[in-house]
Image (tube, rainbow, N blue to C red):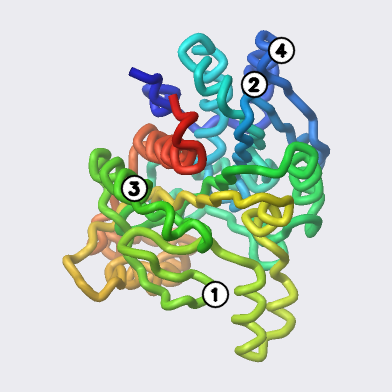
Amino acid sequence: MSYALTSLVDATPTFRAHGRVRRPIEKACADHRDIASFRELGPSEEGAMLYGVVLGTGPTTVSLIAGNHADEPVGPETLRSFIINGLAHRDKMAPWFRRFRFVVVPHTNPDGEARNRPWMEQWPAPTAYLQHAVREEPGRDLEYGYPEMRPENEHVSAFLSENGPFDLHASLHGMSAGEGALLLINRPWTFRTQALRDDFAEAAAARGLPLHDHNRKGEKGFFWIEPGFQTTPRGDAMRTYFRARGEDAMARRFHDSSMEFVASLGGDPLSLVTEIPLFLVPGRDSSSHRPERYLELRERLPEIRARLERGDDVEELLAPFDLRPVPLDAAMALQVRALELGLRAVAPESVP
C-alpha cells in the first residue's frame, strides 16, 4: 500500500509562528540536500523574511502556497507539516519525491499572521476569533495581488516563475465559518475532476464535515459545479463585477489571483483552492443550494463584533448557530487529501 500523505499531519498540531518554524524547516532541508532545498525569497513589507522550499526530483511539478488571507492559518500549518514530516519520513515518501517536484511557500503573509496571533493563541475560542481576527481589504488582499501588488506577491511570483510551469497549483485557504467543506477548481478542469470531487466529499464526510453548498450563480466569477464545489476565483471576474456596478475604484484594487498567475506560466495546470471552515455551522436540509444558517450568521456578525468591542456578552447571539470548532488535525488532513487527489488527477500513472 502506498504511503498516504494524510499521515504527515501531526496527531496534535498547533498554530506555529512563521519565524519560529523556520529553523526546523531549514534544518530538514539541510539534512536532505539531495532532494530538498531551502530558499529565502525576500522580506515582507514589515521585514519578515519569506522562504520557500523545493522538495523532490520528479517530472510533475506542483506549486503549493498558503497564507494569502491573514486570518486563515490552517493552510500554512498544513504546508509546514508537509515539509518537515515529509522529510522526516523520507523513506516512505520516496515514491512521491521521485515522481513529483513540490515548490512550496508555507506562508506568503507573515505580517498578517502576526496580527492574528491573539486569537490563534486562544484557539478554539470563537469569541477570541471574532474579536481579534484581522483580514486585509481589497487592494491589500494577497490572493488578488499577483504578480506584484505587494512585496510578498513579487517574491512569491519570482519563485514560482523560476520553477514553473506547473501541472498542479494549490492555494490553501479557509473560511471563518461554513456549513461544511468547500473545494474550488479552475474551470478548464471541472469536467475532468468528477472522481476527485467524489473522493473529496467522501473524505470530508469521514471527518465529520458535510459540504458547504452555495450556488452564487457566477457572482464575482464563482460558478457552481455541484454541491460543495465551485470554480476558483479570478481577478478579471472581480474587476468585471465591480465595473458593472459602477465601482471602478474598487475594480482597480483587484489584480490577478495566484491561480491566474500560475496559468500564465504555461501548460494546463489544475488549480485547487481548499476552503475548510474554522467553525462549523450546522445547516438545515435544503435543496436551494444556499447555506441559509451561514448567511444568517454573516448578517449578525457586525452586531456580535460591536458587542465584543464594548465588552458585552455575546453568548445569546451565538447560541442559535451552534458553532463547532473544526479540529485542526481534521482540517489539515482534508487539505492534504485534496492535494493527494489533485496529484492523482494530473498524473494518474505517477501516483504511488
Q: Which mark is residue 195?
A: 3
Q: Amino acid at mark 1?
A: Lys
Judge by depth and name the residue closer to the eye, 302 or 290.
Answer: 290
| The N terminus, quarter of image | top left
Query: Element type at marker 1?
Result: helix
Q: Is residue 27 in view?
A: yes
Q: Alpha carbon of mark 2 to alpha carbon of mark 4: how far?
A: 12 Å
Q: What residue occupies the far front of the structure in this picture? A: 349
Mark 2–mark 4 CB contact (< 8 Å): no
Label 2 to label 1: alpha-carbon separation: 37 Å
Q: Earlier in the sequence, mark 4 or mark 1?
A: 4
- Compare residues 50 and 128 and report the one nearer the observer: 50
Indicate which label's residue lies in the foreground, 1 or 3: 3
Disc 4 marks which residue?
A: 33
Mark 3 neighbour density, 10 Å: few (under 14) some (14–19) many (20 or more): few
The foreground one among 33 and 323 is 33
Q: What's the residue at 30%, 61% (across, down)?
A: 318
Q: Nearer the viewer, mark 3 or mark 4?
A: 3
Q: Which residue is mark 2?
A: 25
Based on the displayed image, in which of its 4 quarters is residue 226 positioned?
bottom left
Q: Is residue 231 found left or right of 247 in the rendered image? A: left
* Badge 2 or badge 1: first in the primary sequence: 2
Q: CA distance from mark 1 to mark 3?
A: 27 Å
Looking at the image, tell me whether mark 2 or mark 3 is earlier in sequence order.
2
Q: Is tag 2's residue or tag 4's residue first in the polypeptide sequence?
A: 2
The label number, if any, that marks residue 220 in the structure image: 1
